[in-house]
Image (spheres, helix red, strand yellow):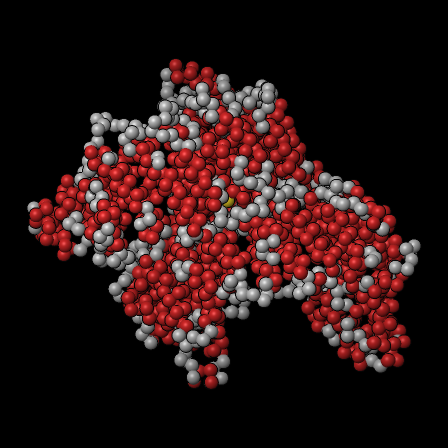
């Protein structure tokens, strides 16, 4: 259902005239008739801007009615003057300005001269402005005059020189003012935008009014216009070179520089050469005009920075005319030079804003190149065809940036790729794209990419647009199914669905434009719809959900007629395939299709139900389906419609009530959210349709509306609506019974909240239903009881619902019940159970909205303040909350006083955090910056701040202790107390609480003598009551004390953070302007610093961080420079303290530096993200210098702090891409830190490295450590972090040299693991080309040597890390080189570690080679043949002469890989007869055949047995092939008889062997059942007579996994073959076997069967 947004009312500020203007109009206006003056006078007197617009539109008809002689009329002149003054006084964004300009554009020609004179006078006055901060208004007016406003353009033409002079002055003045306000970010930002506007206006002036400067510009270089243009050119070049300006100012300055140069330079044909010289740095000053060198000297003589080059390229591309090669050969050269410069910058510019600009400018370059191509430019065609170097490098850029973290860069990469394809198509226009080698190679490479690469989807979509879907499908018909299978990953689903939409839309166009117009739909359904239906029925939850959300709506939009095909197919099998808890089945698929179709307007539910396509029973089955998403789809079918006013039928309402009965208690939070969302849509539909019905009822006189309508009784439908909603609310309130589950309460309260909100009473509308009419006292009690829930979201929902119904709720509550509620809230606010204080807070917030709260409840607690009752118009809520906070404050102050005497007693009897939490909650109910009782609030705020400090002082010694978790004594013996006293000595010097220094013990009966506060007499009752509680036995634990302390710190931090928001953003000398003073804010900042730097308990400093963030955000918005600079001062101070390494420092070096990283995070993150991020740069620079190891460090503590802080900054999502330029430095610091001899540094380096891996490669979503989803290609990695290339190469060389040492083989370099880990995260890509500046080859020898490590895990990682550094065509050569390096059996020195590492590298390389999808390539087959031959010469490693079982297993794994591949490719398999003979020989000599000679467990035995079993299974699969079994050749007969059978494996004594054999049998069986293998021959012969063996295993098998697998195999077998063999195999008849099976089910939860 599409919910229409209500149109926002346009706010138009009305203009007004001064007294002199009004008098002038009154003098010309006539009472008896309307003239221009009277119309303007009437317009000026209106206060509504919309009415003034209507009035202004009447001006032109009046003016056009005047004759030409009226041009001399003083009334007309006066009116035009006033109109001009009004125009220039209006704000640029005011619609009145545009309406006035539009009206004046219709001014008759004979009045134009007079009007221009009036406007020129007004504009001349504007140009006299001298205040820099008023320049913006003048600039806006100049811009408005040049935008489709004839009078304005004529006025500027008349004052052209004055305007030029003003612009020169404005540019210089704004620049100077910006310099003088250095450091004041708010003022500087405003000035930057003014400067940007001035540059834009200057550009508009030159572009739109160039004809005015043509006359004098070229004739006389001494003229004023020429000098002005030179000044503008000089200013633009200065701004372009000024790195302190905003990037947008520099970018626009680049545009302006090229534009001004283009306007002034002569001859124009030489301009491209000039720009080329600037970009390439050739500095040919002699060939440049003197005026250009004088005004742009810096550009001509200095080395240009990367950003300046980028902006110059942008200016050239945007401002020069590239169409149809109009600039000739010089233009072509410039185009290629720009490409060269931009591509060189791509490896240098890594800041997010610059990277985004670069990608956008590259996309502009491709557009310019496309525009520059003309038939008679052969040189350019050669340089820009798909095989050229420029296009190759651009494609390389696309491949390394199509998965960039920034969405803008990814989008621009797609545009670049599409334009490159268009450029190549334009160049080869005469030939066929399908046969073009560039397109063929590109298509093949893209299809060979893994589907997890997001860039593959957009690129393939571009190729489909060029080549057509059918040409792509001819290469691989399974592409649609492959893409649908990818859609179980939400991150890939949008990309996959977009590609599918492009493909099936293009396919449909191809079919409909072809010759098979009548039969195309069936073929189209087979390709795009049939796979969809199959996955919807049998796919997993995530896959089907994403397909329904992303793919199905697009498919139906492309072909709505396909819906009937879907319904027919699914309806046929819906009864038989109802689905399960894990699959939707045909019924679920049907519900999903119907829901999507109805929501997008492709069907009417009533139509399909009346035609019998879907029955009510089917929908009911869907509503109570065991698969949650089927229930949601069925509900969505009822609730979602394309029209928001569609009437809800009686059947739909009955089905909704049926659904509510069974689904309120759903255990899945997402399902509950979806239920509430869908029902909300239904309620909106009822409301909107009810309004339509009310209108029908009102228009009953128009009988035609009802004679032909089935809905002839609107009132009857409205009554049914009311009955339905009433019945629904009854069921929901019934579900809120005491003891109901959390899911039920959440669902019921959410739905009731939606009903209350949607059917609220609005002016001018009748509501079909009102929830407040359904409320009674019992239901109010039910809602209030929800506050007692332990789930806060239930409390929130109940509170919000009560607030929506508060008028009727309070009317149903008597004073006694309110008093009891208030008493309960006060009691709960001091409970020792943390969730009780949350309940208390919601109760107090609820009661604060009652008008008589002070009279009913607060009267006996506090005295009335008569001043507060004088003004009854003041809001009730503020008065009540002020009184409640006063009461809570008095209580908490008394409790703090008691806690100073005994913190243990406080923790056991009256933890103070509850009161503070209630104060916090009460403050949230008020608009803190719009309070009435300012004086009272000032006093309260001051007391709250002091209370916070006092409470913090009481509890901080616990959370700042070095071990806060067990600080409080639990025993009463003196020895324990002495030991505690020693522990407390470790607390920092500021922890001077008397209790802690003398280690008091809590006795069984604790009585606290509290002092009475004379000024608060009502406190007597509280104290008495407290004594009554405290006289009981207090049972306190260390956990209770810690909870009391850290929660108190938490609430104090949140309270202070909230109070900081009271600071006014505007600086004022008057203290009355804010509830909190600057001095108080500074003290709060010092408080946060103190506790963040010294708290040890994570809960305490995390919440202090939350409060401190509120403070820093408030300070960053302040206009006061002293306050705004405070975060920077704090940051510099803490960095100096970290660097100083003072022995007396109280900073915590353990617990990951505790709160210090949080403190710095808050300070750095408060900096505006659109600025230069100077604080971040300064902080990173300081931290990197500390984190890097020095030759003689004075102490390791600063390094530890720096590493921990860096980790926190790299994990902070708020810094986003601004932190990415420092990732490479962070990696270097982490790897170097890992070599430190100090454990603390190594530990922090490890944590930093882990954070950086996550930041680079993303959060790991699955369990597979080697998943390619969290990896990137080597080219992309080193393109994004180029500085890591030399660093990693150097470190890897050091590590490899250590491992290569003959006499120190066991020496392990500490960085080895980190280096291999990060290199192992890379993977090879078919798109890696020859244009990359960074070659991967230098890494290869070092990684190979790392495979000789004595650490098993390092050898594994080196094998994986080697793969991305070897190009796919180099794999055979590298594998052969590795295999030749393996020793022969006669070698004297055999190192098994070296052999194992080499074999693992061979295995990983071979796996990547076989997965490379180059199977039809002749080079591939030759390379594979050479590898097989070479492996044959090293087969001794797989046999008994090799004593190491681990290396034997590794060699066998390589053989299994080859055997499996050759077996799958029968054409190749029969070529390697000798290979299969050798495999049979290896198997016949293995331990499985001859028996295990080892008496005890041997390292690698299980691994070896598993590998040899896999080889046996692989050989069995190959030799069972029909062509081998039926062949009569001696060789084939020899191969067809393997030495081991599957039965032999099933009888093995090792359960690992049996498990592998059982898994193979199950796989073969499933293939046979799925008819993937021919019935004749094949693996079917391997399954013969296995039933008896498997039945015997059911009784003998002891391993649980094997037993389960046996049962699964029997389940998949044909019972007609199994049952006859039960008697002879396990001595049971079928009935006994059935009984035994049922017993197994009953005992399935036991650990042993």
Residue in the picture at 37% in, 62% down: 531
The residue shown at (52%, 24%) is 1236
Q: Observer-nearest residue: 754 or 772?
A: 754
Location of the C terminus (image quadrant): top left
- Residue 535: give x, y in percent of width and height: 35, 59
Q: Report the front residue among 963 and 757.
A: 963
| Position above or below: 880 against 898 | below
Q: Is residue 1392 visible?
A: yes
Q: Is residue 930 visible?
A: no
**Residue 1169 spot, x, y in % from top left:** 63, 45
Identify the image quadrant of residue 527.
bottom left
> Going 70% across and 57% down the picture, which residue do you hit?
332
Residue 1517 spot, x, y in % from top left: 26, 48
Q: As rendered, which of 822 and 514 lies closer to the eye?
A: 514
Q: Could you say which quadrant of the image residue 1186 lies in? A: top right
Q: Is residue 731 left or right of residue 30?
A: left
Q: Is residue 195 left or right of residue 1033?
A: right
Residue located farthest toward the front when viewing the structure as drawn: 1530
| Among the 4 quarters of the image, the one containing residue 1440 | top left
Residue pictured at 36% horizontal, 73% vertical: 608
Q: Give the answer, above or below, for where 253 lies relative to 650.
A: above
Q: Nearer the viewer, residue 1567 or 603?
A: 1567
| Looking at the image, residue 938 lies above or below residue 24 | above
Give percent across and percent down for residue 216.
89, 61
Q: Total marks drawn?
A: 0
């Amino acid at each position: 259902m599409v919910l229409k947004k209500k149109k926002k009312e346009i706010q138009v500020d009305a203009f007004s005239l001064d007294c002199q203007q009004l008098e002038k109009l009154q003098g010309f206006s006539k009472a008896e008739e309307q003239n221009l003056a009277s119309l303007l006078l009437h317009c000026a007197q209106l206060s509504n801007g919309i009415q003034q617009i209507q009035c202004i539109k009447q001006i032109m008809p009046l003016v056009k009615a005047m004759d030409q002689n009226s041009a001399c009329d003083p009334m007309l002149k006066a009116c035009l003057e006033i109109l001009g003054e009004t125009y220039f006084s209006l704000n640029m964004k005011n619609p009145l300005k545009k309406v006035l300009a539009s009206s004046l554009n219709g001014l008759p020609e004979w009045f134009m001269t007079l009007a221009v004179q009036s406007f020129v006078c007004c504009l001349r006055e504007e140009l006299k402005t001298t205040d820099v901060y008023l320049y913006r208004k003048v600039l806006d007016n100049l811009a408005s005059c040049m935008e489709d406003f004839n009078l304005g353009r004529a006025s500027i033409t008349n004052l052209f020189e004055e305007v030029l002079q003003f612009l020169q002055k404005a540019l210089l003045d704004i620049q100077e003012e910006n310099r003088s306000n250095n450091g004041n970010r708010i003022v500087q930002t405003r000035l930057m935008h003014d400067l940007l506007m001035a540059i834009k206006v200057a550009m508009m002036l030159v572009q739109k009014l160039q004809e005015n400067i043509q006359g004098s510009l070229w004739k006389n270089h001494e003229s004023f216009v020429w000098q002005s243009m030179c000044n503008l050119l000089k200013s633009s070049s200065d701004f372009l070179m000024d790195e302190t300006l905003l990037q947008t100012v520099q970018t626009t300055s680049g545009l302006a520089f090229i534009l001004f140069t283009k306007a002034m330079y002569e001859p124009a044909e030489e301009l491209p050469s000039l720009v080329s010289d600037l970009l390439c740095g050739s500095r040919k000053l002699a060939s440049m005009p003197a005026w250009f060198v004088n005004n742009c000297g810096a550009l001509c003589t200095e080395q240009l920075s990367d950003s300046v080059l980028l902006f110059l390229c942008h200016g050239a591309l945007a401002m020069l005319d590239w169409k149809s090669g109009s600039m000739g050969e010089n233009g072509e050269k410039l185009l290629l030079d720009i490409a060269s410069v931009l591509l060189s910058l791509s490896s240098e510019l890594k800041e997010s804003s610059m990277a985004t600009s670069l990608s956008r400018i590259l996309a502009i370059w491709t557009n310019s190149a496309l525009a520059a191509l003309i038939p008679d430019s052969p040189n350019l065609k050669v340089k820009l065809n798909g095989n050229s170097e420029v296009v190759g490098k651009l494609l390389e850029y696309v491949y390394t940036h199509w998965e960039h973290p920034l969405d803008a860069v990814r989008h621009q990469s797609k545009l670049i790729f599409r334009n490159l394809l268009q450029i190549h198509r334009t160049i080869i226009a005469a030939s066929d794209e399908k046969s073009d080698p560039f397109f063929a190679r590109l298509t093949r490479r893209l299809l060979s990419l893994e589907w997890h690469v997001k860039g593959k989807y957009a690129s393939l979509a571009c190729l489909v647009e060029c080549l057509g879907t059918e040409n792509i499908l001819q290469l691989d018909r399974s592409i649609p199914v492959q893409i649908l299978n990818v859609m179980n990953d939400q991150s890939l689903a949008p990309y996959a669905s977009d590609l599918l939409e492009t493909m099936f839309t293009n396919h449909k166009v191809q079919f409909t434009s072809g010759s098979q117009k009548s039969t195309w739909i069936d073929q189209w359904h087979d390709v795009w719809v049939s796979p969809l239906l199959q996955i919807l029925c049998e796919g997993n939850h995530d896959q089907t959900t994403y397909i329904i959300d992303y793919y199905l709506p697009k498919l139906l939009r492309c072909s709505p007629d396909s819906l009937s095909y879907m319904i027919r197919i699914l309806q046929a099998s819906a009864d038989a395939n109802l689905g399960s808890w894990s699959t939707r089945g045909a019924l679920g698929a049907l519900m999903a299709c119907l829901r999507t179709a109805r929501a997008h307007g492709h069907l009417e539910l009533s139509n399909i139900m009346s035609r019998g396509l879907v029955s009510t029973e089917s929908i009911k089955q869907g509503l109570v389906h065991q698969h949650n998403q089927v229930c949601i789809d069925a509900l969505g079918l009822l609730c979602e419609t394309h029209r928001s006013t569609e009437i809800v039928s009686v059947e739909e309402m009955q089905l909704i009530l049926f659904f509510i009965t069974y689904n309120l208690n759903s255990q899945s939070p997402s399902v509950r959210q979806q239920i509430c969302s869908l029902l909300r849509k239904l309620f909106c539909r009822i409301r909107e349709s009810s309004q339509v019905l009310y209108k029908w009822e009102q228009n009953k006189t128009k009988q035609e509306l009802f004679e032909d309508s089935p809905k002839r009784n609107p009132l009857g439908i409205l009554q049914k609506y009311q009955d339905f909603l009433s019945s629904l609310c009854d069921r929901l309130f019934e579900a809120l019974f005491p003891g109901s589950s959390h899911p039920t309460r959440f669902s019921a309260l959410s739905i009731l909240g939606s009903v209350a909100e949607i059917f609220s009473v609005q002016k001018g509308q009748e509501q079909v239903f009102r929830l407040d009419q359904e409320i009674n006292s019992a239901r109010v009690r039910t809602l209030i009881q929800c506050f007692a829930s332990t789930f806060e979201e239930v409390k929130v929902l109940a509170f919000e619902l009560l607030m929506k119904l508060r008028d009727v709720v309070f009317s149903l509550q008597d004073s006694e019940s309110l008093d009891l509620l208030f008493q309960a809230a006060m009691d709960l606010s001091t409970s020792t159970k943390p969730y009780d204080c949350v309940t208390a807070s919601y109760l107090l917030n609820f009661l604060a909205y009652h008008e008589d709260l002070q009279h009913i409840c607060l009267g006996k607690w506090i005295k009335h303040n008569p001043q507060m009752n004088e003004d009854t118009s003041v809001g009730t809520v503020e008065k009540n909350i002020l009184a409640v906070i006063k009461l809570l404050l008095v209580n908490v102050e008394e409790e703090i006083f008691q806690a100073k005497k005994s913190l243990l007693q406080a923790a056991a009897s009256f933890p103070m955090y509850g009161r503070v939490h209630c104060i916090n909650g009460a403050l949230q109910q008020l608009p803190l910056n719009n309070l009435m009782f300012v004086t009272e609030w000032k006093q309260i705020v001051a007391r709250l701040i002091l209370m916070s400090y006092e409470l913090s002082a009481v509890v901080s010694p616990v959370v700042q202790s070095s071990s806060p978790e067990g600080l409080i004594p639990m025993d009463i013996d003196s020895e324990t107390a002495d030991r505690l006293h020693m522990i407390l000595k470790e607390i920092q010097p500021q922890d001077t609480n008397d209790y802690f220094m003398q280690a008091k013990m809590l006795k069984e009966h604790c009585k606290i003598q509290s002092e009475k506060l004379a000024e608060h007499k009502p406190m007597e009752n509280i104290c008495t009551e407290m004594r009554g509680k405290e006289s009981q036995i207090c049972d306190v634990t260390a956990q209770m004390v810690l909870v009391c302390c850290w929660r108190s710190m938490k609430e104090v931090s949140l309270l202070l953070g909230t109070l900081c928001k009271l600071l006014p953003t505007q600086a004022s000398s008057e203290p009355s302007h804010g509830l909190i003073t600057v001095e108080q804010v500074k003290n709060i900042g010092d408080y946060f610093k103190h506790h963040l730097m010294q708290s040890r308990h994570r809960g305490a400093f995390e919440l202090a961080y939350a409060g401190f963030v509120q403070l820093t955000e408030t300070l960053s918005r302040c206009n006061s420079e002293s306050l705004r600079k405070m975060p920077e001062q704090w940051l510099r101070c803490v960095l100096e303290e970290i660097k100083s390494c003072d022995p007396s420092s109280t900073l915590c070096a353990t617990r990951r530096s505790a709160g210090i990283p949080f403190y710095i995070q808050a300070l750095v993150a408060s900096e505006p993200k659109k600025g230069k991020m100077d604080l971040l740069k300064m902080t990173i620079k300081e931290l990197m210098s500390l984190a890097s190891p020095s030759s003689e460090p004075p102490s390791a503590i600063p390094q530890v702090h720096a590493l921990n802080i860096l980790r926190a900054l790299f994990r902070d999502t708020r810094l986003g891409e601004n932190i990415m330029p420092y990732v490479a430095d962070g990696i270097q610091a982490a790897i170097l830190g890992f070599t430190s001899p100090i454990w603390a540094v190594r530990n922090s380096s490890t944590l930093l490295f882990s954070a950086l891996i996550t930041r680079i490669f993303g959060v790991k979503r699955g369990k597979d450590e080697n998943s390619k989803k969290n990896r990137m290609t080597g080219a992309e990695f080193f393109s994004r972090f180029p500085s890591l290339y030399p660093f990693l190469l150097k470190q890897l060389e050091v590590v490899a040299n250590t491992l290569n040492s003959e006499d120190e083989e066991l020496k392990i370099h500490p960085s080895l693991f980190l280096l291999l880990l990060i290199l192992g995260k890379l993977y090879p890509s078919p798109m890696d080309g020859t244009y990359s500046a960074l070659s991967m080859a230098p890494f290869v020898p070092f990684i190979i040597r790392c495979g000789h490590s004595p650490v098993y895990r390092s050898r594994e990682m080196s094998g994986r890390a080697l793969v991305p550094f070897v190009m796919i065509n180099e794999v055979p050569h590298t594998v052969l080189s590795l295999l030749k390096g393996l020793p022969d059996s006669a070698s004297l020195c055999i190192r098994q570690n070296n052999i194992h590492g080499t074999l693992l590298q061979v295995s990983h390389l071979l796996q990547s080679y076989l997965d490379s999808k180059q199977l039809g390539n002749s080079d591939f087959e030759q390379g594979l043949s050479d590898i097989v031959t070479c492996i044959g010469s090293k087969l001794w490693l797989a046999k008994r002469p090799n004593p190491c079982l681990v290396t034997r297993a590794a060699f066998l794994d390589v053989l299994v890989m080859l055997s499996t591949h050759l077996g799958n490719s029968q054409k190749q398999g029969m070529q390697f007869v000798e290979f299969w003979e050798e495999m049979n020989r290896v198997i016949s000599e293995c331990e499985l055949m001859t028996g295990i000679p080892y008496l005890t467990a041997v390292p690698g035995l299980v691994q070896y047995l598993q590998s040899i079993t896999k080889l046996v299974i692989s050989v069995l699969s190959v030799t069972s092939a029909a062509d081998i079994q039926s062949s009569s050749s001696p060789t084939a007969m020899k191969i067809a008889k393997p030495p081991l059978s599957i039965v032999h494996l099933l009888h093995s004594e090792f359960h690992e062997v049996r498990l592998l054999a059982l898994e193979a049998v199950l796989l073969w069986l499933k293939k046979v059942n799925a008819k993937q293998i021919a019935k004749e021959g094949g693996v079917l012969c391997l399954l013969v007579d296995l039933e008896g063996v498997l039945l015997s295993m059911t009784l003998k098998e002891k391993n649980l996994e094997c037993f389960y697998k046996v049962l699964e195999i029997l389940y998949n077998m044909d019972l007609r073959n199994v049952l006859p063999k039960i008697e002879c195999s396990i001595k049971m008849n079928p009935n006994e076997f059935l009984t035994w099976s049922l017993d197994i089910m009953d005992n399935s939860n036991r650990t042993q069967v």
